[in-house]
Image: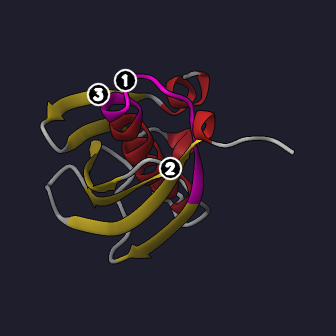
Amino acid sequence: MPFNRLLGIRIHRQHKDGVTISCEMRPELLNASGVVHGGVTASLADSAVGIATVRHYKGRPVATVELKINYFRPIPPTGVVYARARLLRTGNTLSIGQVEIRDAKRNLAAVAIATYILLDTRTEK
């Protein structure tokens, strides 16, 4: 996806229940305080569940319905950040995943829950 390429997101590892993605930090991804911008962290969480969901449903189109994130610590401006998504529920219409975001030293920086909807299961009115 173009947005993921823009951020520098890569699939680090595939798991039976999800995926781990990674992103190398760079100056463009920092906030005014010199740490990783919260929007980047949220995007990593969203992307991790999105990638895991698309993999699970074999490429069916999906969209984010909800994203809830808790930030625990600032992410340093250098190194690789990892987002490990686990799919918690995969239904006929919705998929729900949990994500752990870890910095380069594997410190837990944030957790999130994201809900995705399968677009091709809806009928437009």
Q: Position of residue 6 (x, y in %)?
A: 57, 27
Q: Position of residue 90 (x, y in %)?
A: 33, 50
Determine which of the numbered discs, if any, sits on residue 58 in the image.
1
Image mark count: 3
Q: Residue at x 53, y 58 (%)?
A: 37
Q: Marks 3 and 1, how far apart in space?
A: 16 Å
Viewer-side label of 3, 1: 1
Three-letter code, disc 2: Thr
Q: Position of residue 98 (x, y in %)?
A: 31, 61
Residue 64: in magenta span: yes
Q: Residue at x 29, y 67 (%)?
A: 109
Q: Is residue 44 left or right of residue 98?
A: right
Q: Residue at x 40, y 74 (%)?
A: 71
Q: Is residue 47 visible?
A: yes
Relative to 111, residue 104 above or below: above
Q: Residue at x 52, y 63 (%)?
A: 38
Badge 2 local density, few (<14 within 10 Å), some, or many (20+)? few
Q: Position of residue 27 (x, y in %)?
A: 51, 41
Three-letter code, disc 1: Lys
Relative to 114, residue 53 above or below: above
Q: Marks 3 and 2, how far apart in space?
A: 25 Å
State the residue lying farthest toward the right: 125
Secondary structure of the residue carrying numbered label 2:
loop
Relative to 116, residue 60 above or below: above
Viewer-side label of 3, 2: 2
Badge 1 local density, few (<14 within 10 Å), some, or many (20+)? few
Q: Is residue 35 visible?
A: no
| Pointer 2 residue | 93
Three-letter code, disc 3: Ile
Part of the protein shown in magenta: 54-65
Determine which of the numbered discs, if any, sits on residue 11 in the image.
3
